[in-house]
Image (cartoon, grey):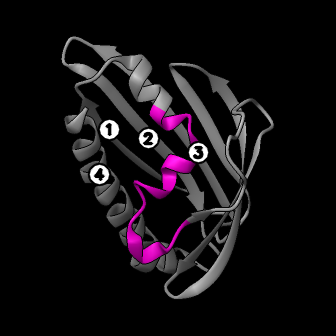
Amino acid sequence: MKTFLFKTQQTLEQPLTEVFEFFSNAHNLAVITPPWLHLEVITPAPIEMVVGTLIDYRLKLRGIPIRWQSEITEWNPPYAFVDVQRRGPYRLWRHTHTFDETVEGVVVGDTVEYAVWGNEFIGRLFVRPDIEKIFAYRSEQLDEIFHRI
């Protein structure tokens, strides 16, 4: 299985505890996901985030309804956590979130290891551009949210 790696980071000028608290609320994912994905968190709030927590979502990917389930496989507040797709559109999706406090603010890091159905061509032509758009939107939303605080 051919895997791909996507990495991004941004600095948010807020305290580590506030930034991590935002990310530890799974329902906030809907706030920072592009509207064209129609993401809905199905798991009722509040969701207790611990290793083994399963979170169910509904979304539309290129207009196709998708059910997605992720599992929290690592939980190290307020510095990091990992979610892994258990059911969804990817052959593999492992998303590592890191939070590093610096003098400039909190560096929010995202590392996604993923694999797609089909061949490498599908991954490069369709999936990678979508992931880049999703994380660009997310970055804009996070800047707006944390500059309002």
Q: Nearer the viewer, mark 1 or mark 3?
A: 3
Of 128 and 34, nearer the camera is: 34
First in sequence, mark 1 or 2: give its number: 1
Q: Farthest residue toward the top?
A: 103
First in sequence, mark 4 or 2: give its number: 2
Q: State the separation of the CA atoms marked 4 and 2.
A: 15 Å
First in sequence, mark 4 or 3: give its number: 3
Q: State the separation of the CA atoms marked 1 and 4.
A: 14 Å
Tally the numbered discs. Answer: 4
Compared with residue 20, is residue 66 higher up or lower down, i.e. above or below? below
Look at 40% across and 28% down and name the residue there. 19
Compared with residue 129, is residue 4 higher up or lower down, i.e. above or below? above
| Chain part drawn in magenta | 22-39
Q: Which residue is mark 3?
A: 26
Q: Is residue 71 left or right of residue 94?
A: right
Q: State the separation of the CA atoms marked 3 and 2.
A: 16 Å
Q: Which residue is mark 1?
A: 9
Q: Looking at the image, do the residues carrying marks 1 and 4 touch, with CB atoms under 8 Å apart?
A: no
Q: Amino acid at mark 2?
A: Asp
Q: Which mark is residue 110?
A: 2
Q: Position of residue 38 (x, y in %)?
A: 50, 74
